[in-house]
Amino acid sequence: MSYAALHLPGLPLTCLLAREQIDSSLPAALLSSGKREKSSLLHLNEVATRFQLSIGMNTTRALARCPELTLYDDDSKLEAQARAEALALLDTFTPDYEDTGADTFLLDLSTVLFASREEWLHQALEISRQLGLPLNLSLADTPDLAHLAALSCQTSSSLRYQPKASLSVLSEPPSIYDLPLDLLRRNRAFPLPQADLLQLWGLRTLGDLIDLPRQGLGERLGPELARLHDVLTGKHHRLLKLSRPRQDYQTSHHFEPPVEGVDPLLFMARRLLQVLCQRLASQQRAAEALHLVLSFENGAAHSRQLRQSEPTLDPDILLRSLHTHLDSFHAPAPISEFHLRLLPTLPHQAQHQLFQRGLSDPHKFADTLKRLSGVVGIDQLGIPQPAGNHRPGEFDLHPLEADFNIPTPPEPIPAYSRLPLKRQRPPLVVRVASEKRGRHLQPLALLSGPHQGTIQDFRGPFPLSGSWWESPWQQSEWDVALPKNLLLQVTHTPPHDWHLTGIYG
Amino acid sequence: MISQLLERSRDLPLALIDGHDSFDPASYGSEKCQRIFWIRCREAMQAIQCTDLLLRDGNLPLILLDLHLTSARELKRIPNAIWHRFRTEARASGASLLALTPRPCLPSPHSRFTLSSTFTLQNLELEKPQLKTTNSEEAREVVYS
């Protein structure tokens, strides 16, 4: 007896009746959506079935047979809420269960210890009272046999509220073979479209069906009948499709009274992050980012996603990134509430190279990068890349990630000279004595600036221009040698501007 | 010198803390620039802050602090205690700090080198210069030729 089935008969209707506290001794039915004249019956309570009403019958006909019939519209939200409550209840019985259908759940009890069958059923039914819904509970050796037994209150233990609240535990339940074939006529788990034909053959119960040879059933009526035969004889033992509740990795804390400093927030955040990390660990996941939302006393809010350099399960690392962010953040008012959410991902696994050195602590480096950005500005650090405008001295900086994933630049950085240049940023305006040679002015001496003197030797001119289609620029570069082996780069911008742009060496 | 450091540094980028925003990537080419983590500072104290952060981090093995174009007045404002702290932090984290200054101002470096060079305009078209070491009494002198 390692499987149990919990069946909530007519759940969409019974949860409506339970919420409205309607006397279920009166006939009631749930209608399909659409116009009432054209709608049909979706579910009936037990009293309604006594008036020869059946599921699928149209409303007019049903009211003609039973004028006292109360009709209800479908309330999917209420049904979903009832199902969620049922799933939460099942989670207290065992973590291994299957959400089999709209009104049935199968439980794997192989890991649950219980003294006797009756004791477990009694305890489970007692706990199930909190649902406030009628239900059937059965035990069997296979999941499908337990499911079949739970479909009828004759073969299962049950909880009922009408005419009065009662709990019945069957110590020796009757065999499911006595159940009528009609029970499976509209069942989705065990469809039996040939029920009419079988009844014509004189078969009335499930027991009659298993008396027939399996092979003949399969050949004449199809493989579904052969499968049902296997289920009824216990030969078919399927695996449950276990249902896992959706885990959320978020939590909130409300400060009463609101706090002004960072320390109380970090103190609480550390505790909450530990819980969230444990939740992640139980699902074999790690956090790739931490989402923080701060609510302030004046109604303002602040949210920020703190992405980690690599997925982590260490609350200290997450707390450090939170601390770094809060250090540079100025709250407009005392903090009244904060909300933390971890974005789950698969843990990072990498094979380290034997002869290659990597970062010893990527999280710490990511944190350091953020701090460096705070000192010099986010656009002032990174890997140099060509700016794309071919103007000397202008470069873009590709942000450095902790994994050093650097894209290849679209075009290479051209190497202009063999000697390294120390650029003067911004270029220093200097006065230069010059004379006209051809189309260019040739420098003769530097008259102002930090390096002055007669030019002893020169290379140039190297005329450069660009962006003629929007903001054109044009200049001529000269490499000049001053006394004491000082090599400089000066630039002439027509008509008369000279700049010191760099020093070689 | 940066060029030769980049030839040796393979796995992790060289952290270049540019104290005067004077680094010119065009002097080194694409391949070497891919291995430079360039931090452009506007003043010496920013460069000192960045050095402090990287030394405490300890992930990058080589940090080059370029204060070559920093004025003597600005260099004097850096307290000696900072250089001592850098030395302690570098020792703790296993990183190496190479500081380029226009004159000797670090109080107790592990090694001190004096770089000198004599170039003419013809060198701009010749092979890249190489560092050569010569011995002197006070410090090892490195000649760029």
Image (cartoon, coloured by chain):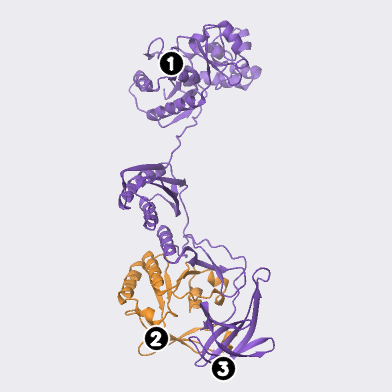
Look at chain A in the picture and name its colour: purple
Point out which mark residue A456 bears: 3
Under mark 1, the amino acid is: Ser
Determine the residue positioned at 41% across, 59% down: A367
| Front of the two marks 2 and 3 | 3
**Judging from the image, what secondary structure is the residue with disc 2 in?**
strand
Mark 2–mark 3 contact, CB under 8 Å?
no
- Mark 2 vs mark 1: give the one in front: 2
Q: Amino acid at mark 2?
A: Arg
Query: Compared to A318, does A405 lie above or below?
Result: below
Tell which chain the image draws in orange: B
Q: Which label is found at residue B140?
A: 2
3D distance between C-alphas at marks 2 and 1: 94 Å
Residue A247 place in picture, x, y as percent = 44, 38
Q: Chain of mark 1?
A: A
Looking at the image, residue A489 lies above or below residue A67: below
Same chain for labels 2 and 1? Say yes or no: no
Tell me which numbered mark, 1 or 3, is placed earlier along the sequence: 1
Q: Circle 1 sits on which residue?
A: A156
Q: Are marks 1 and 3 on the same chain?
A: yes
Q: Quadrant of the N terminus of chain A?
A: top left
The x and y percentages for residue A212 are: 58, 13
Front residue of B116/B38: it is B38
Q: Tell whether B30 sits left or right of A155.
A: right
Crowd rating for badge 1 (residues with CA inside 10 Å; few <14, some 14–19, many 20+): many
Q: In the picture, residue B79 is in which quadrant?
A: bottom left
The reply to whether discs 1 and 3 touch (Cβ–Cβ < 8 Å) is: no
